[in-house]
Amino acid sequence: MCEITLLISLVILSIYIVVTFFLGDKSTAGLLVPLPAAVAALATAVISFTSYVWAPQAQMHLVAFFNYLCLSATTGILIFFTGGVRSPYIVLWMLLSIFAGLFGKLALILIFLAANSLLAYEFVVHGAQLGRGALVVPLLALETPVLISYIVWREKGAQDSKKTQAFDALAKQLSQVANKSEIVINAITEGVVAIDVQGIIQLINPAAQELLGWTKQDAVGLDYRSVIKLIGINGKELPPEASPIQQVLVSSKPLVNNDLALMTHSGKKILVSLVISPVGQDKTTQTSGAIAVIRDITGEKAEERQKAEFISTASHEMRTPVAAIEGYLGLALNPSTAAIDDKARTYLMKAQEATQHLGTLFQDLLTVSRAEDNRLAPKPTVVDVVAFLHEVTESLMQKAQTKGLFLYFKPAGVGGEDAISNRTISPVFYSFVDQGHLREVANNLIDNAIKYTKQGSVSVDVTGDDNTVTLSVADSGIGIPPEDVSHLFQKFYRIDNSDTREIGGTGLGLYISRRLIEANNGHIWVESALGKGSVFYVQIPRITHERAAELLESEAAQAKQPTTPVQPLAPALPASQAPAIPTVPQQPA
Ligand code: ADP
């Protein structure tokens, strides 16, 4: 608007200068600019130029309106002094009137009043002289643009008001959603902390304030590391890069951790469960932060520990009599130590089977309690995985054959006798893991494959790449329903259907396998098709031949030095608690 005002007022001024200084009295063209109009045009030009240069952006609408009024006033003066309704500048007025609606109701009213004042003046002063009908054309010329402008302004106003209404409704809705979210977040009994991508705390709910001992006023705006001080299993504060929150901010992947402690503002240590989820991590947007849900699990952990202690002690205590019963049953079934009839033999064999199962259960329970106490620290040694797994497979051959299954070790070739002799064609994979742990896992997987396969085959394989070795046990057995796959490695999880009901088990084997493999920095998973079979995979880190040679050398050197005996997987019983396996038949009490 400032530019247009400046331009028009400069044109008026130019006409004034040209007519007055160059044409003089010769101008009869009617395009005269009287001095008052020239002065008004000059003032308008100065105002519009000043507005153009200095006016603040926020006040632009007001400034434009003011410029419009100045230009209208200049045009009005021009018209007044150049013949009123007969002035050629009426055209300029009409143009200006059309734009009045842009500045709203006030501009329309002012333009309307100005036009009508001129008409009234003309009517009163020159009415008689002009005749009755002479004012009809000026009336139409002056009123029509104002009318058009009014209609356009109303239409636009209606649209704007619709937009404003929609905007208000949206704003209200958003504020309601924000209120609801706040109510929900504040009502959550677990601590919720929202952290932006720079690691600054943006939100902390009352539960988190209570848990961490920080008030909202103090915590919001601070770096999360000053507020959420995490302590690792070793009792030391976690370095920033090891913090799960940092990991989520960097990787945009959700994380769950139940093994960390937290130092509160007052210096108290509590055990916590942390669930950290990235915010805005979809394909299109970058991570914009993370939400940490913190729960105090000190009580739960203490309870768990008590339970584990109870299970551990009970299993320990019960293993002793069970081992004794197994021993007696062995003696009773041994023809050289006892004479029994066939019926009794059948009963005793069933009793022995059940006792063995009980013994396995206690052993599994002991391993579980060790795993939960983090007492499964691996004692790694160099393992030639192919040879090792071949040996484990061989040890279960008898069991498979008894069930009529074909168990074979793939790297040795189908029907192959010995993997070691085929070394030239089968690659050698070395790993640095706990042999006892790996044996237990392999045993469990092959044993399960035999157990859950009615007919067909079980094959064991080893493959690998530069960094990992993958063991696989495939069977043509009953398979696993897809909905059970994600629960399979949980404690006591057994699939309960017509196929498995008859097969005994504890539901602990796969859980223990997972814990053992994770303790050795590996992972375990399954792929299965119901009714067709399953493949269990175990992936462990691979080491190079050179590294294996180095480690073997240092193992050999260590073996030469007198060392403390290697701790077996199951805790060794004190001599007083060792199972009393009788060597001679004794009279049961
Ligand atoms: P269990 O002592 O019951 O065998 P595991 O933890 O070893 O306990 O296995 C858990 C469950 O997983 C089993 O009860 C069984 O239903 C299922 N399972 C394990 N291995 C296989 C397999 N090779 N084929 C089909 N189901 C299997």
Image (cartoon, rainbow, N blue to C red):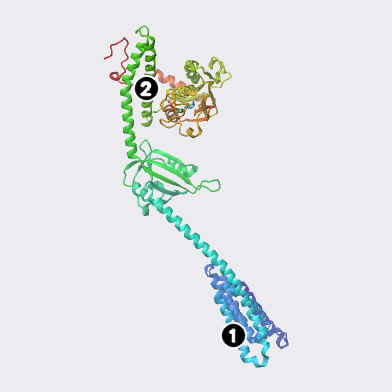
Query: Residue 211 location in percent, x, y?
Result: 34, 46
- Is residue 21 positioned above or below 502 on the image? below
- In the shown orientation, is residue 413 left or right of residue 29? left
Camera-nearest residue between 397 and 267: 397
Query: What kind of element bears circle 1?
Result: helix
Camera-nearest residue between 248 and 170: 170
Quadrant placement of the N terminus: bottom right
Query: Residue 508 location in percent, x, y?
Result: 41, 28
Amino acid at pointer 1: Ser
Marks 1 and 2, how far apart at CA: 112 Å
- Is residue 345 positioned above or below 528 on the image? above
* Label 1: how many Cα within 10 Å (few below 14, some 14–19, many 20+): few
Q: Please tell me in which quadrant of the rendered image residue 315 appears.
A: top left
Residue in the image at 59% along x and 70% along y: 155
Name the residue that disc number 1 marks.
117
Disc number placed over residue 358 in the picture, else none: 2
Q: Residue lying farthest front? A: 343
* Residue 541 can be seen, yes or no: no
Q: Please tell me in which quadrant of the rendered image residue 125 appears.
A: bottom right
Query: Residue 328 location in percent, x, y?
Result: 33, 14
